[in-house]
Image (tube, rainbow, N blue to C red):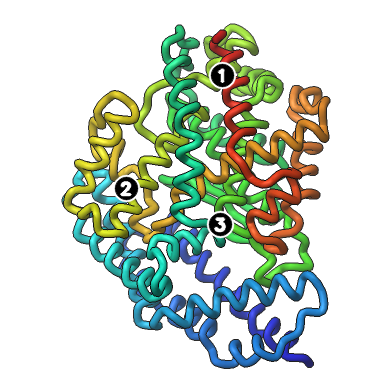
Amino acid sequence: MTAYDDLMLFQRETEALSQVAGRLGWDQETMMPDGAAPQRAEEHGAMANILHARRVDPRVGDWLAKAEAVDDVAAANLRHIRRSFERTTKVPARLAAELAQTTSLAHRVWAKARAAEDVAAFLPMLQKVLDLRREEAAAIAGNTDPYDALLDDYEPGATGASLSAMFAALRPRLVALREAVLDQPQPAPLQGQFDEAGQLALSQKLAQAFGYNLDNGRIDKAVHPFSAGSGLDVRITTRTNPADPFNCFYSTIHEVGHAAYEQGIDHAHLLTPLGAGVSMGVHESQSRIYENQLGRSRAFTGWLYGQMRDQFGDFGVADEDAFYACVNRVTDGFIRTEADELQYNLHVLLRFDLERALISGDLAVSDLEAAWNDRFVADFGFAVDKPSNGVLQDVHWSEGLFGYFPTYTLGNVYAGCLHQALRSALPDLDDDLARGDTSRATGWLRANLQQYGGLRTPVETITHAAGIVPQEAPLLDYLEAKFSAIYGI
């Protein structure tokens, strides 16, 4: 047994325990009784203590010092373990456990405050979460930007400054296209009521159409759709709205993109650092290309139109072209997860700027709602009507996920690069999509990106698959071509 062998045996058990901790979170979102929240918070804290202790175990440092990388896989495993060890040793065990326990409680407080439209009920708990995350960021960052330390949890190698520059390049063309589109007559919206059973039945069909393996997964309902797990146990959730079946269908496709990434990783990497998606930005590239470039394409929506007629009968949309325009309708709205492709990134940039200000101390928690509402009016031209459509709509800050939001837009940028390469490799792809067959597209993504898991860095992962260094131009070109055609501009 070499030092590397000893390290990987130890790491495998750590990865397994991490999966168990993740399952606690999945259960909390889907099945846990409301009264169990205090006990679940303690359980989260206990698991965080155990995982923290393993990640800072002095033996890990000794093994890292002695281990030799005999190939690219070993080198990548050592890179991930070393990064985790160096970051985690800077965070006291007390702080790690307190963060886990506080965010578990904060999630429940947020859910109740959101239901009651009561921002004041959530702010004290948000302040506790923010204080703990600031403490953690300061411990990790040293003399660097604390926000970058948090961002690095989700997108290794990215910085707030680099993302700000990318987002600044995105904004002018997005705003100009948005204004041009909203100046045109709008396609007719979907109308009517669509029963939940029918939505869930079709969402399961969509999940399978995009390659989700239900032998190693399941679909449940949650307030905020998500994907959880990796390897042989990857679960997703969706939600339903009787007046808006697209919410269910595209939430499902989106989460299947995440799940397919995890299910597509080479099983040789199971329960190793390479056995999960390399970053949230890369993860989001998969969910967004499944949902948008594939799932909202003219070819695939033509097939979906037929599926909806089979499930619901005549639902008032005349033909496939009208349905395509309806699916891709650009309308004003409050909710990020329900936003059209064109305006989605503006919702993300709002959150990115506000959370950076919270971490830096430039924005007080007590002023957050007003800052959100002011920025929303400035960006979208109308006022937030209630907190659940504004500052309380997202779960992320209650869970301490500061630094997570910008990875959504970064994922869109990555997806733009991947889609350009995918279409070049498969020029006749629309023939498949028109039959509801995504297998060549998802197979290309699996072969060129998903199977490798964490083998490469995020930027290297996209560059390898797309053939170009990540850049915003392919996304903007795609959006301008698509929506100019739909709206005749």
x%, y% of residue 94? 35, 82
Residue 140 in sight in this render: yes
Distance CA(mark 2)–CA(mark 1): 29 Å
On the image, numbered disc 1 is attached to which residue?
483
Query: Considering depth in this image, is 428 or 251 the residue closer to the camera?
Result: 428
- Residue that appears at 56% across and 50% down: 281
Q: Vertically, is 354 above or below 56?
A: above
Q: Vertically, is 79 above or below 285?
A: below
x%, y% of residue 407? 51, 49
Q: Vertically, is 189 above or below 90?
A: above
Q: Vertically, is 360 above or below 141?
A: above
Q: Secondary structure at mark 2?
A: helix
Q: Nearer the viewer, mark 2 or mark 3?
A: 2
- Residue that appears at 30% across and 36% down: 389
Mark on residue 282? none
Residue type indicated by callout 3 = Ala
* Crowdedness near tag 1: few (<14), some (14–19) or many (≥20) residues, C-alpha within 10 Å: many
Image quadrant holding the N terminus, namely bottom right
Distance CA(mark 1)–CA(mark 3): 33 Å
On the image, numbered disc 2 is attached to which residue?
354
Residue 455, image quadrant: bottom right
Query: Considering depth in this image, is 76 or 451 the residue closer to the camera?
Result: 76
Residue 231 in sight in this render: no
On the image, numbered disc 3 is attached to which residue?
228
Image quadrant holding the C terminus, namely top right
- Residue that appears at 64% across and 33% down: 474
Distance CA(mark 2)–CA(mark 3): 27 Å
